[in-house]
Amino acid sequence: MTSAITITETAAEHIKNMLAKNGNAIGLKLGTETHGCSGLGYTVDYVEEASEGDELVEDKGVKVFVDRKALLFLLGTVMDWEDTMFSTGFKFSNPNEKGRCGCGESFHV
């Protein structure tokens, strides 16, 4: 079975570091929320207890739970970590995106 999302090695290493600093978390939760001028933004939160219905992606030694309400928007997404002079954070390559706002903070499907 194919995973809902793909986690890169760089993202997995950063997730491991984040979880090591938060002793109660068992993984991260990836979702979407209404945000910005294009409609949706990505959310990443710590997970202390799995929620029924969320899709578990366990890869490269980390657990990422995909919010069941956002699953259709996120199928096929690649979750990466970017650390550049201008940007630091998770970067998402989502094949479902039809467009992004000018500042890159939100997207629509």
Image: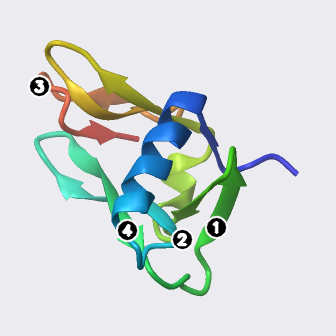
Q: Is residue 100 visible?
A: yes
Q: 69 or 49: which is nearer to us? A: 49
Marks 4/1 in contact by CB < 8 Å: the verdict is: no
Sequence-wise first label, 2 or 3: 2
Q: Residue 55: which disc? A: 1
Marks 3/4 in contact by CB < 8 Å: the verdict is: no
Sequence-wise first label, 4 or 1: 4
Observer-side mark, 4 or 1, equals: 4
Residue 95 percent location from the top left of the image: 54, 30
Marks 1/2 in contact by CB < 8 Å: the verdict is: yes
Q: Which residue is mark 4?
A: 46
Disc tally is 4
- Give the spatial CA distance, label 1 vs label 3: 29 Å
Marks 2/4 in contact by CB < 8 Å: the verdict is: no
User: Which element carries disc 2, helix, strand or loop?
Assistant: loop
Amino acid type, mark 2: Arg
Q: Which residue is mark 2?
A: 68
Which residue: 51% across, 65% down? 27
In the rendered structure, the answer to whether residue 52 lies left or right of residue 21 reads right
Amino acid type, mark 1: Glu
Residue 87: name its quadrant: top left
Q: Quadrant of the C terminus?
A: top left
Q: Is residue 31 visible?
A: no
Q: Residue 17: which disc? A: none
Sequence-wise first label, 3 or 4: 4
Marks 1/3 in contact by CB < 8 Å: the verdict is: no
Q: Which residue is mark 3?
A: 103
Residue 26 percent location from the top left of the image: 52, 72
Amino acid type, mark 4: Tyr
In the rendered structure, the answer to whether residue 10 lies left or right of residue 109 reads right
- Give the spatial CA distance, label 3 vs label 4: 26 Å
